[in-house]
Amino acid sequence: MTDIALLSGYAKDAVFAYRDRQLITVEQFLRDVAQLTEVLPARRHIFNLCSDRYHFVVGFCAALLKRQISLLPPNQTPDLIGQLKSRYADVYCLTDDAKPYPALETVFYPRMSATSSVTPPTPMIPAAQIAALVFTSGSTGQPLPNEKSWRSLVRSAAAEIDSLGLHAYPGMAVLGTVPAQHMYGLETSVLMVMQGGFALHAGRPFYPADVLDELAALPRPRCLVTTPIHLRALVSKSSELPPLDLIVCATAPLAPQLAAAAEKCFAAPLYEIYGCTEAGQVASRRTVETAEWQAFAGLTLREDGRGAWVAGGHVECEVMLQDVIELRGDARFLLHGRTADLVNIAGKRTSLASLNYHLNSIAGVRDGVFFMPGEKDNAASRLTAFVVAPGLTRETLMQALRERIDPAFLPRPLRLVETLPRNATGKLPREALNALCAATGTSG
């Protein structure tokens, strides 16, 4: 395999995207990619900051044709961008915002000409070409880069399509509430679309009412690509929800109760994706049916004294997973939480994921997280919990936790807050939680 097509599964007159309630054909998409390729400067690295998902994809594909590597960091803080600039000196920014991006040479997404009627052929991309550097989220430390070849990205998309049975949904419209710059967003709202012959929704609506309006405007079959935090907000809406054909959820453990509620509200099956930035997506499960995860075709898992490893398929180099996994054969497993999240207090052991599950199962809790400030082997450190629960008191919450968890793991203290500092994918980086501790006067 030397070259792989940019797109797969599309008929000649197929729809590639829906943008501002208007359809964009595959032919128009290919013309837009060709035009943008002529505009981009000759560089090695590109920081694609386009918020419009269609613009992002056009930029991503134009960069592929220019043999450029897309840098996809977990956030856009000045500190992290400064690190990117020092490490990749020739990096420039592509944006569809009206203002130049600070500290980087900025290329504005252009207004595309509609005069050309000549559609270029579907480009072929070298399989081994490095398409992107995707950075870890920083949940447990500094973001680290991971190379993704075009071959690995295409194989990952194909494995997801097969695992979820998406061949049964030709031309499916896909709306994502996650940014395309995140690994999950890239795989499921971009690459899965491009390699499955589907149609992407160009926007990224934020408020529940806007998400539901945009979903309702899309033709069937239609799919929602989202996260647990977004899903909870959608399901809490009292209005009637538009029926879907598929829901895909990832980035954090999903409570079975929420999965069941989502399937009922949207009249569609929900599948969770398990993965990590280093390996990409690894496995899926129908959450309401089983606690077991099924690895994607071609992947195998093994354990040793250091932990669990995944290899094969789209994972080009064996990767150690940062989670506690109980293997059920070489392709099925149970997930018990992050290795870094294990908590050992008074000789008793649990995980932060388990504690978070019990905290968020309390009626009236909108969001909540357990956190261990400082080093875990520091005897002075204590578990802390931050909770968004309007109308509930600390005493009510603590009593509810006493009924659910061992007293050794009760938070000391428990802080009521208005919101949690989640990033665009719903994650809580350790830096943000440390800042929240400082702001609330919480210490170990």
Image (cartoon, grey):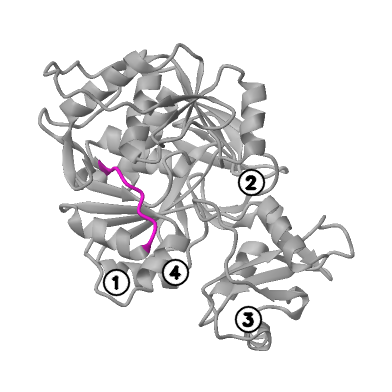
How many numbered circles are shown?
A: 4
Instruction: Please report the residue visible at 89 percent of the width from the left and 63 percent of the height from the top.
Output: 379
The x and y percentages for residue 438 are 76, 61
Q: Earlier in the sequence, mark 4 or mark 1?
A: 4
Mark 1 lies on residue: 264
Pointers 3 and 2 in contact (C-beta within 8 Å): no
How far is the residue under mark 1 from the one under mark 2?
33 Å
The x and y percentages for residue 57 are 34, 32
Q: Is residue 261 left or right of residue 384?
A: left
How far is the residue under mark 4 from the one under mark 1?
12 Å
Instruction: Please report the residue visible at 46 percent of the width from the left and 61 percent of the height from the top.
Output: 228
Closer to us: mark 1 or mark 2? 1
Mark 2 lies on residue: 322
Tag 4: residue type?
Answer: Pro
Tag 2: residue type?
Answer: Gln
Q: Is residue 308 above or below residue 233?
A: above
Quadrant of the rendered image containing residue 307: top right
Residue 279 visible to an observer of this rendering:
yes
Mark 3 lies on residue: 404
Specify the segment rendered in magenta. 200-207
Mark 4 lies on residue: 256
Tag 3: residue type?
Answer: Arg
Rendered-image quadrant of the C terminus: bottom right
- Is the residue marked by circle 3 packed among few (<14), some (14-19), or many (20+) residues within 10 Å? some
Closer to us: mark 4 or mark 1? 1
Rendered-image quadrant of the N terminus: top left
State the mark number for residue 65: none
Residue 205 is one of the magenta-drawn residues: yes
Of all residues, the one furthest to the front in this rendering is 99
Residue at disc 4, secondary structure: helix
How far is the residue under mark 2 from the one under mark 4?
23 Å
Q: Is residue 122 above or below residue 368?
A: above
